[in-house]
Amino acid sequence: MKKTQSLKKNSFKLFRFVVVLVGLIGLMGLSGSLFSATVSISTGSVGKDVEALRTYLDMWEKDTGNTARIVTLPASTTDQFGQYKIWLGNKNSDIDVYLLDVIWAPQINQHFIDLSRAFSKEAKEHFPAIIASQTIGKKLVAIPFFTDAPMLYYRKDLLSKYNTKPPKNWEELKSIAKIIQNGERAAGNEKMWGFVFQGNAYEGLTCDALEWINSYGGGSIVDARGQITVNNPSAVKAIDFMATFVGDISPPGVLTYQEEEARGVWQLGNAVFMRNWPYAYSLGNSSDSAVRKKFDVVTLPRGTTPNSKSAATLGGWNLGISEYSKNKEAAISLVKFLAGKKIQKLNAVNLSKLPTLPALYEDKEVLKAAPFFATMKDVLAEAVGRPSGPTQKKYNEVSKEFWTAVHAVLAGDKNAKTSLAELERKLKRVRGRKW
Ligand code: GLC
């Protein structure tokens, strides 16, 4: 009797214990879902960007108990912009954090929250010029993730085989490219080309062509005061000259190449020179690359006019938080994590992305992974900005007219004199009475 009583008592205790345990687990789950958030970040992608971002997000999830989801967009910044405008126009709350091209802040700032208070300390740690480019009025629209300035990639092995050095100007580039291309074709590589770049009709061509005209002393399409300057003899000379590359030292298909297509040809070992952003450096040295350890980078060639120089277009990507996000606090935590030193260093070492924190340019591990970063602070300081500031909300239209005009010359449809004169008239119409 006693035995059954104590058995009953014990099983009741066990039952109570189980009920409490289940309750506790339930509560923990509830509090977890109450206090943890799911944040979506949308990004375009080249190379191993998305893979790397996933590992960073895993780290942040572990630190915070939150969850992060990636929404991947096409590689072309032009296509991304189109999609973003639709989402933002619809006040879409599915995306919390956007990776934003450096040129977009003046055009879409109204859809992003002001980060100046939440990031008052961090903002001082990045290059001031980038913070300035992301500040519209007093609003800090986005926090820098990485910056960008292109280089001329060249095949060390081939240049030394042909006993030559990296070109100083675009005409030298053309003649060296031609000699090596012909030599290598005769030696059996029929697929060899001299130079690959971004010739597709999109924002990337605006970057490349801005470098050409600027390196010839032909300005920057629209100047800092908003004057349309693109129709000038130096710009005409530059664009006409680059058009002679197509089908000669550059494949006819270059007219459809974006960054990744150019890198594809280069990384298979089928180009002597390539214009590309720093991300192609670490990928080019990866174990599956035919050009691993066979190449180096230098600043882009100069023009051949008296006032010529080497010109690199300033690129870069920044993190903004949507006005329509329902998880702003968690999004701020994620942006702090991604833009901070730890991730910027990983991004530099593993993906050769240029940090926006000046101190990392002196970091030993960064310089070991990408020795050319030692020179990049100077390149960045001199880099040419696209006229997204002066043309404000109309930048995308300006850029589109510009890349269309240049593409027509590259395709052989028009000469640069005609095309840039037409462009000037079109840009005047786009501007109207003011930008
Ligand atoms: C790179 C640059 C970006 C530029 C784009 C053009 O991603 O960082 O600023 O707009 O290339 O393709």
Image (spheres, rainbow, N blue to C red):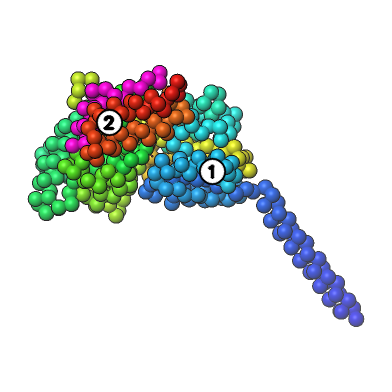
Provide the residue designation for mark 1. Answer: 87
Provide the residue designation for mark 2. Answer: 419
Residue 381, image x, y percentages: 36, 25
Residue 384 found in image quarter: top left
Q: Quadrant of the N terminus?
A: bottom right
> Which residue is rendered at x = 36% and y = 28% of the image?
426
Please name the amino acid that badge 1 sits on.
Trp
Mark 2 lies on a secondary structure that is helix
Magenta stretch: give its range. Answer: 225-244
Q: Mark 2, residues whose alpha carbon is within 10 Å: few (<14), some, or many (≥20)?
A: many
Mark 1 lies on a secondary structure that is helix
Residue 382 found in image quarter: top left
Q: Quadrant of the C terminus?
A: top left
Q: Mark 1, residues whose alpha carbon is within 10 Å: few (<14), some, or many (≥20)?
A: some
Residue 69, image x, y percentages: 54, 50
Mark with earlier residue (1, 2): 1
> Which residue is rendered at x = 22% and y = 50% of the image?
269
Q: Is residue 172 above or below residue 338?
A: above
Contact check, label 1 and label 2, Cβ < 8 Å: no
Left of 74 or right of it: where is 70?
right
Residue 296, image x, y percentages: 24, 40
Q: Is residue 67 magenta?
A: no
Label 1 CB less than 8 angstroms from ligand 1 = no
Q: Is residue 237 magenta?
A: yes
Q: CA distance from mark 1 to mark 2?
A: 34 Å
Instruction: Report whether residue 159 is seen.
Output: no
Residue 415, image x, y percentages: 22, 32
